Amino acid sequence: MLLNVILLIVGLFVLILGGDFLVRGASNIALRLHISPLVVGLTIVAFGTSAPELLISVKSALAGSPDLAMGNVVGSNICNLALVLGITCLIEPIKVQSDSMKIDWPVAMGSALLLYFVAKEGYINRIEGIIFFSLLLAYTYFIIRRSRKETKAMRELEEDLSLEDAVTSNVWKDVVFLLIGALGLYYGSEWFVGGARDMAVDLGVSERVIGITVLALGTSLPELVTAIVAALKKETDLALGNLMGSNIFNVLSILGVTSMITDIKVSFEILNHDMIPMLGITLLILPMMITGRTIGRFEGGILLVIYLFYTYTVVS
């Protein structure tokens, strides 16, 4: 049991470290090729921060543990909009940007609904995975094109990412970063999934429970830490859009890519006991956004209570 916990912690640490190295190396190389920092931020950085979830889902599905794959994605989406957003709002209320209401929320809600109706068949196959990934490409193209037209938003994003300052003087150093990142993601996901699967056996609980709780919380830690730091600095303007963007990426990219590699079976428990709360929490965000154009501490408290209650129902 202790060995599994150590594997889980070490695997998570290596995963996060690998994603960071991958982002650094890929971003530096992209900037050398004169690719806009905006494009880098919306593509390479987004992929790098979601790479741990992607590797875990692919390996879980290939290893015959589909509940770990689905639980990781669904649980991570619930964690983002209930736990992470709730804690962020408790520290510092979030002002809602118009784009979050007009674009981010509808796409996040739409992708969650699409996942639910596709999953009702009991599995997600390759064709559906291609559709998911195609929708992600269309969404990414749209937001890049829209952001390019908004020079003010582009400058803010460039300053936030600070990618120009990250370019290293040696291209081989960037290649080494890429290799270290890829190795970190591979071995980190091996250890993390293996530790989680063995822990489920040791504790006598289902892989769904481990996926929804341990894996989801673990892979959401980077977003949680980033959100808390941003809240303490009173820089939460983009937090809501970023979290919704992460949820969109989780569904369309992670499940899209995974199901293109191998069909993902969807259990009755995940479909009815986990996806329904995911849809409900995503829907609940809309009235919170509309009321006063600010998600305050009261709403943050509600979201946190919902997450704690949901987690209790899962593990009990």
Image: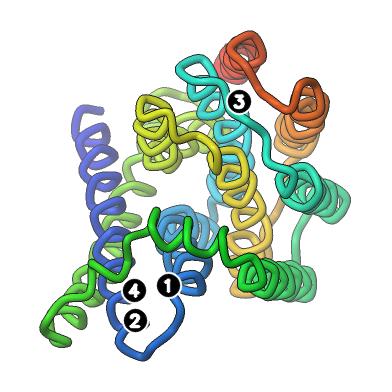
In depth, the one of 233 and 51 nearer the eye is 233
In depth, the one of 127 and 251 nearer the eye is 251
Residue 237: x %, y % from top left: 55, 38
Residue ID at (70%, 54%) = 265
Query: Which one is in front in this view, the residue at disc 3 or the one at disc 2?
Result: 2
Give the residue type at disc 1. Pro
To which residue does mark 2 refer?
A: 31
Residue ID at (56%, 60%) = 152
Q: Label 4, label 1: how many angstroms apart (C-alpha)?
A: 8 Å
To which residue does mark 4 refer?
A: 27
Residue ID at (45%, 39%) = 220
To which residue does mark 3 refer?
A: 82
Q: Label 1, label 2: how many angstroms apart (C-alpha)?
A: 7 Å
Q: Mark 3 or mark 2: which comes first in sequence?
A: 2
To which residue does mark 1 refer?
A: 37
Vertical arrangement, residue 14 with respect to residue 76, above or below: below
Q: Kindly state the secondary structure of the residue where label 1 is placed.
A: helix
**Tag 2 near tag 4, CB within 8 Å:** yes
Give the residue type at disc 2. Leu
Quadrant containing the N terminus is top left
Residue 123: x %, y % from top left: 76, 57
- Classify 10 Å Cα crowding around label 4: few (below 14), some (14-19), many (20 and above): many
Give the residue type at disc 3. Ala
Residue 169: x %, y % from top left: 12, 81
Q: Residue furthest bottom?
A: 33
**Tag 1 near tag 2, CB within 8 Å:** yes
- Classify 10 Å Cα crowding around label 1: few (below 14), some (14-19), many (20 and above): many
Q: Label 3, label 4: how many angstroms apart (C-alpha)?
A: 30 Å
